[in-house]
Image (cartoon, rainbow, N blue to C red):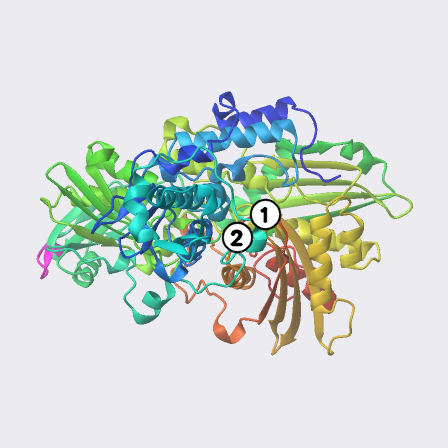
Amino acid sequence: MSAGMNSPLSRRRFLIIGSAVTGGLLVGCAPDPHDRLGASNPVPGAGGEVSLNGWVKIAPDGQVTVAIARSEMGQGVMTSLPMLLVEELDARWEDVRVEQAPVAQLYANTALGLNVLPFSGDDDSLVARVARGGIQRLGYTLSLQITGGSSSIRDAWEPLRLAGATARAMLIRAAAKRWGIDAAGCRTEAGHVVHPTTGAKLAYGALAQEAAALPPPDEVGFKDPAHYRLIGKPVKRTDVPAKVNGSAVYGIDIRQPGMLYAAILQSPVFGAAVASVDSSAATKMRGVVKVLQISDGVVVVADSWWRAKQALATLKVSYAPSANDKLSSASIEQQYKQALSDDDGFAFANRGDAQQAVKSASKVIEATYWAPFLAHAAMEPVNCVAQVKDGRVEVWASTQSPSLAKWKAAQVAGVDGDQVTLHVPFLGGGFGRRLEVDMVEQAVAIAKELDGRPVKLVWSREEDMQHDMYRPAALSTFRAAIDAKGGVTAWTNRVASQSIGLDWMGRLLPWAASDTPDKNQIEGAFDIPYAFDSVEVRQVRPQTNVPVGSWRSVGHSYNAFFTESFVDELAHALGQDPVAFRLARLGRHARHKAVLDMAASKAGWGQPLPAGVARGVALHESFGSICAQVAEVSIVDKALKVGRVVCVIDCGVVVNPDTVEAQMQSSIAYGLSAALFGEITIADGRVAQSNFNDYDAVRMVNMPPVETHIMRNTHAPGGVGEPGTPPIAPAVANALFALTGQRVRSLPIKLA
């Protein structure tokens, strides 16, 4: 039995679920996929296009347009999402184009909330099912149109296939009505309705108008997966040509007539207020239009961003003393240690009597691990374009949260939400940073002062690096009880880290932020798949004034390092092979076993390696997917070299294997950058790092080859954008131990 919460509903579980669902349980079920077809047409047709539901339009020439309700930030949603609809529609892929969906309830992400519920992936209890339905209903009710949490495919799996199948059924009925025959005798192929008996054929474009006049059927069937033409097949991404030829438009590329540019300077010390500003030199510089002070700092507006930035450098700004003036990485780590010592925390997993098992153990193995703050460091710096004119607001934002961005723009401008038009161009990286809407708030506040002219706010790289919403630092302590026979009888783990949920809500809705249990902080720790007689995992939540937010794979990013490193420590302490040790404790988790077995086999686990090379392994489940990685490391010129990574992913039904492979490579590169280089340090209340010269990343020269193997099965789709990130740090650290005997308990990895 795993350490997940599979016991009856207790007060502890009720508190966690209640804080996450916040009333959604009163509904008790997820929104009906039929409700998400759309009673109206949020994406109206043009040039003769006809909408068959809120997701698909068909033009007279047969062109099919699919509405994409998620932000494209490199993960491939503009290909994988339309594949779902087009598969069931039976259209030709070459006839398909995509269009960014507007903000509307129809496009809410109902799967996102599943990430905050305190259940292991295989928990199918009544409580888990009701809670999942409630949180999905709540997401739909709140119209949360958000891209994150590796949820795009998981959310779209039913509604987009249903939209395609429903449109197909309507087209068949329209053709049958025109021919005067029974619709049951018709079939579809390549964008046509066909009557096999007579050989008659009608193109979708010729039928769309008549089909749209018909009511959608109450029930439709989905294709047998054996007949899939797109799902599960490698399909070239639709966004790649524009990104290659330079025509792709990112937020930072937006140009509008009469547009001004804004550069911003924010307080270097967290929470420090501006005391005074001398802008006399700046206002005399060529092109400068205004110098403004907003809640987040001081802004120069000019006719070019370079001029705005140059003028910004001449400002003489002083800041009021702050309670954070002495804040440092050392003081934060000490605060965490004190919290673990003083605070019993909240038990997310508590099975058996772990404390008694530790007291009566023949041997106790203990370890403490640390992970630092991390920046997102997306290639596209924070930016936003806004215009406030004639009571209306128009915003162009590379955002992962369109619904929140639109709401915040309306709030700042003092208008109703229907007076805001939001455009979502490509994102030059998101990783959770663009779940935040601070840049929208700033840009709209600036635009209000510019008499109707649009303004583009761009943060410098230094501002971006030093005013992030950082991945929280985390401190984790373990104790494992070993009996006289060498068996592990108890596993205890305490994790101290800031609450992302509390911080995020504090920024958006301060009145609603409450100090309730936060699953995101403890995910990947309370729900480990390994079977131990007794398990106790506790969450401790010290708060600092360092702003924190979601970072690719969120709590899994550090908890996988902690748990998989300690599992490795136990295996070595007991003289057992790390793969065999894990397999022996996976119990009923057949999918985990299969993933780990394949990773070991593909990596050649147990086979000889060249002198000076060693392997390490890690296994982790996150966002509905299971990922195992084996890393090979060596030391070259006194530096750690990762020479090869073998990755196996079980993400359930695979939509586009090319995208899955690309996401594994991307997430491993991101996680490896953090494992080898990533560290945000605090001194005198401010971030010490400022750019890539002191916050490095893996380069092409030191990026290892990644071999990705995808498990094929019929389980419901899991995520792929994030599950590849958590296992890489522990796999590399475990390999380093196998090579040198040096046990890494703190990131980034540094050779002794």
Q: Are marks 1 and 2 in contact (CB under 8 Å)?
A: yes
Q: Residue 636: where, in percent of width, then height?
A: 62, 77
Q: Does 604 sit above or below residue 209?
A: below
Where in the figure is residue 339, as x and y percent of width and height?
A: 59, 36
Q: Secondary structure at mark 2?
A: loop
The residue wearing badge 1 is 622
When the figure is inspected, residue 267 is found, relative to residue 408, above or below; the finding is below
Left or right for 603, reference 219: right
Number of marks drawn: 2
Query: In the rendering, which numbered label is found on residue 722?
Result: 2
Disc 1 on helix, strand or loop? strand
Residue 398 location in percent, x, y?
32, 52
Residue at the spot 46% in from the left edge and 52% down from the top edge: 197
Crowding near pointer 2: few (<14 within 10 Å), some, many (20+)? many
Reading the chain from its start, which is encountered first: label 1 or label 2?
1
Q: The magenta stretch spans which residues?
A: 282-288
Q: In the image, what residue occupies the spot 40% across and 42% down?
A: 181
The quadrant of the rendering that contains the N terminus is top right
Amino acid of disc 2: Glu
Quadrant the C terminus occupies: bottom right
The answer to whether residue 141 is left or right of residue 9 is left
Q: Amino acid at mark 1?
A: Ser
